[in-house]
Image: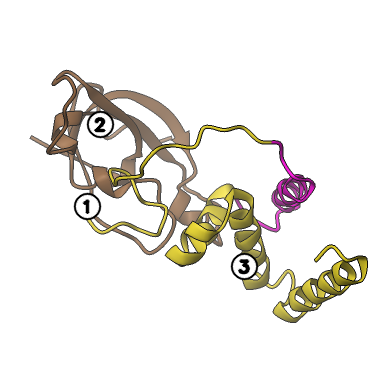
């Protein structure tokens, strides 16, 4: 099993791309930045389950994003966060 | 925000009130569920991701017109045909056979 590319507390950016196949990244978080809240383990890559076996497995991170960064008209508390699990190959380090 | 992938990718859009009513499953819905689990167990489908992919390829019209298990049924049929497990002709013949039986029974 490879080492984790990102650590808890690190700032990451979710890739903004749309492969023409099932992928587990909703468009409203693509291109957004957040903080790694925890590392959730390994799972088969959904994009490679289509006519494949999902190998190699990819690490999953729970990424925490302020709701006010996601929705320009967000009316709730500024402390509200979205937490979403994102596969490692969708993440890059952000400043 | 980027372009949505498929008709399911609706996070953040206005949706109106949510229907929270509960309902029992129809017999055919149990059958679809059972067929999916069998197809997975027999390795005819690799993973739920493959069925999700079939659902996400529905046109927005079909996606919005269909109920939850109708979408699974369409995806299962699409996947089994595109993998060559069954042929389109076999599927069409079976649909015709069921339709004829229902008409004979007066339930169509």
Give the Cα separation between the discs numbered 3 and 2.
38 Å
Work out whether disc 3 and disc 1 sit on a shared chain.
Answer: no
What residue span does the magenta drawing correspond to? B24-47
The reply to whether residue A3 is in sight is no
As drawn, the label of residue B78 is 3
Report which residue position mark 1 lands on.
Answer: A16
Residue drawn at x 62%, y 72% is: B82
Q: Relative to A42, is A33 on the left or the right? A: left
Work out whether disc 2 and disc 1 sit on a shared chain.
Answer: yes
Tell me which chain the residue with mark 2 is part of.
A
Residue drawn at x 39%, y 36% is: A59
Q: In the rendered picture, chain B carries what hue?
A: yellow
Indicate which disc, 2 or 1, sits on the residue closer to the N terminus.
2
Give the Cα separation between the discs numbered 2 and 1.
18 Å
Report which residue position mark 2 lands on.
Answer: A6
Discs 3, 2 touching: Cβ within 8 Å: no
Residue found at the very far bottom of the displayed protein? B89
């Amino acid at each position: 099993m490879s080492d984790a590319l990102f650590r808890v507390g690190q700032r990451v950016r979710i890739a903004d791309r749309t492969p023409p196949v099932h992928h587990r990244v909703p468009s409203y978080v693509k291109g957004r930045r957040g903080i790694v809240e925890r590392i959730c383990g390994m799972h088969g890559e959904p994009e490679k389950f289509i006519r494949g076996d999902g190998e190699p497995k990819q690490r999953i991170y729970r990424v925490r994003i302020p709701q006010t960064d996601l929705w320009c008209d967000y009316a709730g508390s500024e402390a509200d966060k979205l937490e979403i699990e994102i596969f490692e190959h969708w993440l890059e380090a952000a400043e | 925000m980027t372009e949505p992938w498929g008709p399911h990718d609706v996070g953040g859009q206005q949706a109106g009130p949510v229907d929270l009513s509960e309902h029992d499953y129809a017999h055919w819905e149990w059958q679809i569920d059972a067929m999916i689990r069998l197809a997975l167990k027999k390795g005819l489908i690799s993973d739920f991701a493959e069925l999700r992919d079939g659902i996400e390829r529905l046109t927005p019209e079909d996606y919005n017109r269909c109920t939850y298990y109708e979408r699974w049924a369409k995806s299962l049929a699409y996947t089994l045909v595109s993998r060559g497990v069954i042929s389109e002709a076999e599927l069409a013949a079976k649909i015709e056979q069921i339709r004829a039986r229902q008409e004979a029974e007066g339930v169509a």
